[in-house]
Image: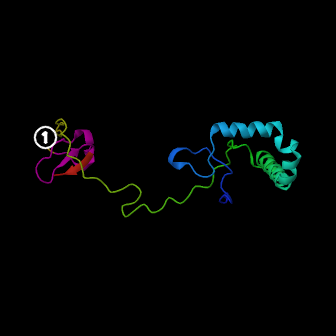
């Protein structure tokens, strides 16, 4: 819960220049007031004390209330230091991944690689038959139409 607005303005202030108002006092005047308060002039002068006693009583009770609030805030709420961190919460929803999915769209196909070294032809100089097929014996370059060749480890037909 946030603090509410102040009910009354300050009793006095030390504004100067263009911001000075009816409640403005000098620093020297503030020191005089403090010295009289510290000396107990407001209590020692019976005439003044009898006149302002009800207001002083109310101020004393307000001071005690403020001290109680200060005690409560420090003891129950804390001194403003950050406390220990609590446990992590559950992971939230990651949301939609879009039309192309989580991995994104597939990129364009790269350029073809260089041709491999020439392989050895079959024993009779032709493409080997299926019974003697061995990938290492197939040529690595595309031959005439309908012949088998070794296309980077895959058997292909020209």
Q: Is residue 129 magenta?
A: yes
Residue farthest toward the left in the current orientation of the protein: 144
Q: How many marks?
A: 1
Q: In this view, does 33 lie above or below 69?
A: above
- Callout 1 secondary element: loop
Residue under the image location 14 percent in, 44 percent down: 126
* Quadrant position of the N terminus in the picture: bottom right
| Residue position marked by numbered label 1 in the rendering | 125
Q: Residue 5's quadrant in the figure?
A: bottom right
Residue 68 is left or right of residue 147, and the answer is: right
Where's residue 42, x and y in %? 83, 44
Q: Is the magenta stretch mostly helix, strand or loop?
A: loop
Between 118 and 27, which is closer to the camera in this rendering? 27
Between 96 and 144, which is closer to the camera in this rendering? 96
Q: Is residue 53 above or below residue 14?
A: below
Judge the density around disc 1: few (<14), some (14-19), many (≥20) Cα neighbours within 10 Å.
few
Residue farthest toward the front in the current orientation of the protein: 47
> Magenta span covers which residues?
127-153
Q: Is residue 44 above or below residue 9?
A: above
Where's residue 131, x and y in %? 27, 48
Residue 108 is left or right of residue 3, and the answer is: left
Q: Is residue 145 magenta?
A: yes
Q: In this view, does 61 lie above or below 14?
A: below
Between 123 and 98, which is closer to the camera in this rendering? 98
Residue 71 is left or right of residue 124, and the answer is: right
Residue under the image location 17 percent in, 45 percent down: 127
Q: Which colour scheme is used?
A: rainbow
Q: Residue 117's quadrant in the figure?
A: top left
Where's residue 120, x and y in %? 18, 36
Residue 127 is left or right of residue 37, and the answer is: left
């Amino acid at each position: 819960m946030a603090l509410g607005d102040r009910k009354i303005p300050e009793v006095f202030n030390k504004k100067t220049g263009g911001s000075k108002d009816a409640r403005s006092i000098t620093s020297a005047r503030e020191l005089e007031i403090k010295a009289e308060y510290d000396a107990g002039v407001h209590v020692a002068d019976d005439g003044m004390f009898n006149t302002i006693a009800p207001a002083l009583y109310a101020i004393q009770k307000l001071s005690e209330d403020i001290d109680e609030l200060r005690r409560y805030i420090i003891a129950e709420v804390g001194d403003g230091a950050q406390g220990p961190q609590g446990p992590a919460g559950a992971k939230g929803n990651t949301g939609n991944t879009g039309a192309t999915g989580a991995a994104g769209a597939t990129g364009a196909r790269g350029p073809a690689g260089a041709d491999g070294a020439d392989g050895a032809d079959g024993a009779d100089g032709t493409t080997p038959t299926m019974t003697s097929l061995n990938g290492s014996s197939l040529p690595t370059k595309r031959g005439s139409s309908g012949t088998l060749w070794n296309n980077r480890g895959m058997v292909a037909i020209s």
